[in-house]
Each structure stands twice: as C-alpha cells, then as structure tokens.
Amino acid sequence: MGRWKIKICSFLAVLALFLATSAPASAANLYFTGLNDTVAPLTSDSMPFWSGGTLYVPYTVFDSSRNEVGISLGLVTSYNRTNRTVTFYNLRQILTFDLNTGNCRDELGGAVYSSRAIMRNNKPYVALNMVCSFFGLEWSYHQLPYIPQGYLVRIKNADVVLDDGSFIENARDLINNRLRDYTQSLSSAETTDPAPVQPSPPPEVDGSSTATYLAFRCESGQGLSGILDALDRAGHYGAFFLSPQVLEEEGDLVRRILGTGHSVGILAEGEEVRPLLEQGSLALERAAQTRTTLAYVPAGQRAALEQEGWVCWGETLSLAPSGTVGPNTFANSVLDRLGDRRRTVYLTLEGGTDTARVLSTLLRRLGDSRYSIAVPMETRL
C-alpha cells in the first residue's frame, strides 16, 4: 500500500509541476486533437503547433488508418519519402504538398497554393486550414476550461454530432485521461520501479546531455544547399539568419529551409537595424507567405528589440571554419571551446561552403560528446 501511495504522490507532483511551469507560456501549452466526437491520444511527436500564425497538424490525423482512433474524415493520406511529397485524396480531389518547393498543388485542377508542409519529429505537418478548406472540412480551436494552458483543435466532417461546447464538456473525462497518459509517459522514469543494476563497463561519456541550438549566419546563399543536405542526413534542425538580400534573391532556398522544418530569422547588423528588419520581413513574406520574430542583431540593440516582440539570438560561441581546416580538426576546436558546459549552448556558424563541408562531422562529434541538437523554435530560444 505504501508503495502505491508513493507512486500516486509522485505522479501528482509531476503533473502539478508540468501544468504550473511558467517558462515561456507557449512552450508549455498542450494541444489536444479532436476528430469529430472523440479525442486522439496526446503525444509529444504528434501535437499540433503554431508557426507564423498558421496552425499545423500531422498529416496522419486525416486518415482513419493512421490517427489511432479510427475516425474517418473521408480522406486517405500518403507520404513519399523519396520525392518528399505528402498527398491527400478522396474520390473527387487530390492535394499534394511538396516539401522541396514549399507549396501544394491541386493535382486535378492544376492550381498551386503557397501553403507548405513542415517536418517535425521526422513527420510531415500540414497547414490545417489549407487541408480543411480544400476538402470541405471544418475545424475549430478552443481553450479548455478545465486544463490550464490546454487547447482543443477539433477537425470535423458531416458525421459530427456534438457542437463544440457540448463536446468539450462531454469529452472532459476522455481529455483528462489523455492528459494522464501523456504525463505518465513523460514521468515514467519517476513512477516505475528501478530495474536491478547490472555490472557494465564505464561509458565513454558521462551520460548527461546539453541542449544545443544551431544557427547559421548567412550573408549570401553560398553553401546553403550543402548545409541543408548535411542537416537532413543527420535529422537535425537549425535556425537560419538570412540577410534581406538573401531573402529577396533565394526564394527557393528560403522555402526549402522552412519546408524541411528549420527556422528562419533576419540577419540585421549595423547602427540602424530596424529598416533591415522591416526589409527582411517583407522579403520573407513575399518568398514564403510567412513572418518571423527571430533576429540576429548587435548585442547592444537586443534589449530594445525584445521589448518590441523580437526574439533575438544570443550566442554562446560563434565560429567560421577556414578553407584549409579539416572537418575533424574543426570539430575538435568547437568541442575544446565549449569545454565542459552543462548549460544550454547556442552555437553560431558562418554560412558558406566551408561550413557545409565540415558540418556532418561536427554534428556527429557533438552527439558523441553529449551535446543534444534541439529544435530552434521561436518559443524555445
């Protein structure tokens, strides 16, 4: 009996801590997915998210064979990893998202739309409004009255029975059960009995992990494709700070950056950065129909810009590999400079062909040395 009391108390403590956390508010939000009159399981790798004012959901939620609750919304979905395309179809329409170009296409009508898919957790996410409007589905978004920082994203077709208000109340127990299962999955290490310790050789590293955010400072488009290729192969994500000129001239690369799950910020340096930030914002909106609050600006101007809503990059270390340095030598230099850090690392690399050349080795060596590459979202920096 005592053991179960300890487990219950531990679970409640973890749940309270999880719900009460105050580090950036949007980072702690919980997004539940409602499909007609039920709620899909809540997991970290399938939770909806906002980006650039657009709500994104995993492509799998629209397909009854993939959404874990068997609810049919009248669509079938497929993801072609080779071509990097996500296709939705029914008997009358076909819509394909192209991760390479950052747009989507009506395969029968021929129209091309600027809506893009984004890679998150090795899974394509698509703009909810685009899919729903194209196929005649409805969706809604409500804050849950009984879960702090909890929100319901509900997708509906003609088979739906309950209106949103009734559904939110009737699904209260189910939603709380989904939250309980989710919280238990996060705290499994806290609530399970430890396995017997088996003798083993000492590990090469100490087993800890330091969150590491990567940024690329790009005054030109040179080397960008190679950097993206290296990140794609390693399954990692970075923040690309692009000058207004790059944003204006490299539209295809900008769309590729966003379409493959990376973040885009504006590189603005000099005494007057606000005109550059405005120029970059307009160029990004023209290139990819989105906006950003990420900015790479001089340290002395960060505080004022952050008061205006910008998220300014503050780096731990900034390096630019030379044309003669070898990949392993450069990786050794980075690790030596980082030392034995335990706090979050913000690593800036100069964009260009030399960074593209050494990046794969650096990513591997960082992983081997307990530096865990994190996804650089605006709410986490």
Image (cartoon, helix red, strand yellow):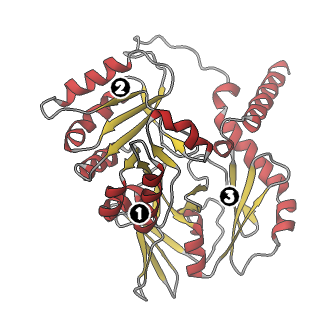
- The x, y position of residue 276, in whole percent, is 42, 53
Q: Looking at the image, how many numbered discs can be counted on the residues? A: 3
Q: Is residue 243 above or below residue 299?
A: below
Quickly name the residue at label 1: 283
Evaluate if marks 3 and 2 touch, with contact meaning CB atoms under 8 Å apart: no
Dot 1 surroundings within 10 Å: few (below 14), some, or many (20 or more)? many
Residue 123 appears in the figure: no
Q: Secondary structure at mark 3?
A: loop
Quickly name the residue at label 3: 40
Quickly name the residue at label 2: 368
Mark 1 vs mark 3: which is more N-terminal? Answer: 3
Residue 77 appears in the figure: yes
- The x, y position of residue 107, in whole percent, is 41, 83
Comparing marks 3 and 2, which lies closer to the viewer? 2
Q: CA distance from mark 3 to mark 2?
A: 36 Å
- The x, y position of residue 151, in whole percent, is 73, 55
Q: Which residue corresponds to the image point at 63% horizontal and 43% vertical from the top-left?
A: 27
Q: Nearer the viewer, residue 312 or 57?
A: 312
Name the amino acid, label 3.
Ala
Horizontally, residue 148 falls left or right of residue 300, namely right
Q: CA distance from mark 2 to mark 1?
A: 38 Å
Horizontally, residue 204 falls left or right of residue 281, namely left
Q: Secondary structure at mark 1?
A: helix
Name the amino acid, label 1.
Ala
Q: Is residue 313 above or below residue 164?
A: above
Q: Is residue 311 above or below residue 138?
A: above
